[in-house]
């Protein structure tokens, strides 16, 4: 294809580049959104509440305070992981190098989320609530993902 084929305007080039950028940014954006939903107060909390039965207001407040404290305490670690992943991706010159970056980042995030789950389970134990089960990755359950759920 030449610019003459599409007229004198290079709009087709902008569309191709835009489409490629969209494709390139889609996966990290989806991964970040999924991680954010798992970290924040969201649907996972209602599922955890249903599993435990009815929580008292005091228990809900204690779990919230524990989650909030962990979120704030681990913020710098999560930010460092994102920056490290970006730096690794920028340095990657091959598909294998890119995949290695992504795998390393996923493993680091899993470790961090497991730490968060341990913090929440310690609080649940203190409150006399059932512990959250260790979840297998979603990939082993037949879909994408892999970060453990904790609520």
Image (tube, grey):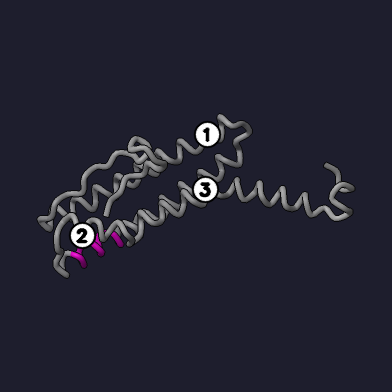
| Residue 86 image position (x, y, % from top left) | 55, 45
Q: On the image, numbered disc 2 is attached to which residue?
A: 49
| Residue 94 image position (x, y, % from top left) | 61, 31
Name the image quarter holding the N terminus.
top right
Give yes or no for contact between labels 1 and 2 (Cβ–Cβ under 8 Å): no
Question: What is the C-alpha distance between the residues marked 3 and 2?
Answer: 30 Å
Q: Residue furthest top?
A: 96
Tag on residue 99? 1
Q: Quadrant of residue 39?
A: bottom left
From the image, give the main secondary structure of the stretch colored magenta: helix
Q: Secondary structure at mark 3?
A: helix
Question: What is the C-alpha distance between the residues marked 1 and 2?
Answer: 37 Å
Q: Secondary structure at mark 1?
A: helix
Mark 3 crowd level (few <14, some 14–19, many ≥20, 10 Å Cα) = few
Of 9 and 132, the residue lying toward us: 9
| Rendered position, 59 above or below 132 | below
Tag on residue 28? 3
| Residue 73 image position (x, y, % from top left) | 34, 56
| Residue positioned 55% across, 49% down in the render | 26
Question: What is the C-alpha distance between the residues marked 3 and 1?
Answer: 13 Å
Q: Secondary structure at mark 2?
A: helix
Mark 2 crowd level (few <14, some 14–19, many ≥20, 10 Å Cα) = few
Mark 1 crowd level (few <14, some 14–19, many ≥20, 10 Å Cα) = few
Q: Is residue 34 left or right of residue 13?
A: left
| Residue positioned 77% across, 51% down in the render | 12
Q: Quadrant of residue 89?
A: top right
Name the image quarter holding the C terminus.
bottom left
Question: In the rendered structure, which segment of residues is drawn in magenta?
Answer: 60-68
């Amino acid at each position: 294809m030449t610019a003459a084929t599409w007229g004198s305007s290079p709009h087709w080039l902008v569309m191709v580049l835009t489409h490629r950028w969209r494709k390139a940014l889609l996966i990290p954006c989806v991964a970040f959104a999924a991680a954010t939903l798992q970290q924040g107060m969201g649907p996972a909390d209602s599922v955890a509440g249903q599993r435990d039965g009815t929580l008292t207001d005091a228990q809900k407040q204690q779990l919230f305070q524990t989650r909030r404290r962990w979120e704030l305490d681990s913020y710098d670690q999560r930010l460092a992981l994102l920056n490290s992943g970006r730096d690794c991706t920028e340095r990657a010159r091959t598909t294998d190098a890119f995949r290695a970056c992504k795998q390393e980042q996923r493993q680091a995030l899993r470790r961090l989320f497991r730490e968060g789950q341990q913090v929440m389970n310690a609080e649940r134990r203190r409150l006399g609530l059932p512990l959250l089960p260790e979840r297998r990755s979603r990939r082993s359950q037949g879909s994408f993902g892999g970060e453990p759920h904790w609520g």
